[in-house]
Amino acid sequence: MGKTKIVLISQRCCTQPFVIVGSIIERNKKFLLVQECGKWNQPIGWLELREDIIDGAKRETEEETGLKVKITGFLGVYSLIKDKEGKVLHAIKFIFTAKPCGEKKNSTTKLKTKWFSYNEIQEMENKDQLWDPDLPVIIDNYLKDKIYPIEITSNFKIVSE
């Protein structure tokens, strides 16, 4: 999946911001991360065209972790700008909280998952082992209980004009 993700990024338009959805899953003061291209991140990915933002976060989380989850809260909107291989990537990230709600299902990806403490995640940031450098800030907001009801997000579909 890691190489696929890089190819998708290079094939998509990088002249404007794009939307990413993901989640934070905590259990016993540890956070579930996925490994892509040798780096760790929360379960996260592109919002699909016409996809509800909450459904997208749930889909990405389930695809990358293999866990059935319930989206339980909204952490916020984060803007992340990276200079990568001569391209500017500007992700607008909608991050939710999620709880596992059942047995592990067959994952559609082959991503490695592992539970990490907040301190371990901060250490990875110092060693450039995180895919997105804002992950410690997002987890810090989670730990400070800066969680909003999911109803704060809305989805309006216009069928045709």
Image (cartoon, rainbow, N blue to C red):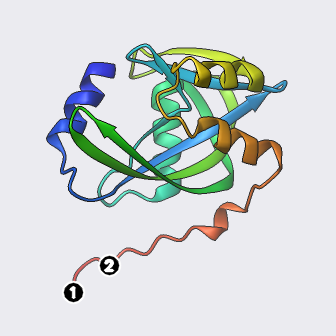
Question: Residue at the spot x=52%, y=25% of the render?
Answer: 130
Callout 2, which amino acid? Ile
Task: Assess whether mark 1 and mark 2 are in contact (beta carbons under 8 angstroms).
Answer: yes
Label count reads 2
In the image shown, does 55 or 82 lie closer to the viewer? 82
Residue 99 visible in image:
yes
Query: x, y (%) of residue 10?
Result: 18, 37
Query: x, y (%) of residue 147?
Result: 75, 55
Q: Quadrant of the N terminus?
A: top left
Question: Residue at the spot x=22%, y=50% of the render?
Answer: 14
Secondary structure beneath dot 1 equals loop
In the image shown, does 88 or 71 lie closer to the viewer? 88
**Is residue 31 placed above or below 81 in the rendered structure?**
above
Left or right of 78 on screen, residue 137? right
Left or right of 42 on screen, residue 138? right
Q: How far is the residue under mark 2 from the one under mark 1? A: 7 Å
Q: Which numbered circle lies on residue 114?
A: none
Left or right of 1 on screen, residue 62? right
Callout 1, which amino acid? Glu
Secondary structure beneath dot 2 equals loop
Residue sitting farthest toward the bottom: 161
Question: Residue at the spot x=26%, y=29% of the render?
Answer: 6
Q: Which numbered circle lies on residue 158?
A: 2
Question: Residue at the spot x=32%, y=40% of the render?
Answer: 83
Estimate how packed mark 2 is, as few (under 14), some (14 to 19) or many (20 or more) residues with alpha carbons within 10 Å. few
Query: x, y (%) of residue 110?
Result: 40, 14
Query: x, y (%) of residue 13?
Result: 18, 51
**Is residue 89 placed above or below 102 in the rendered structure?**
below
Left or right of 112 on screen, residue 146? right
Q: Which residue is mark 1?
A: 161
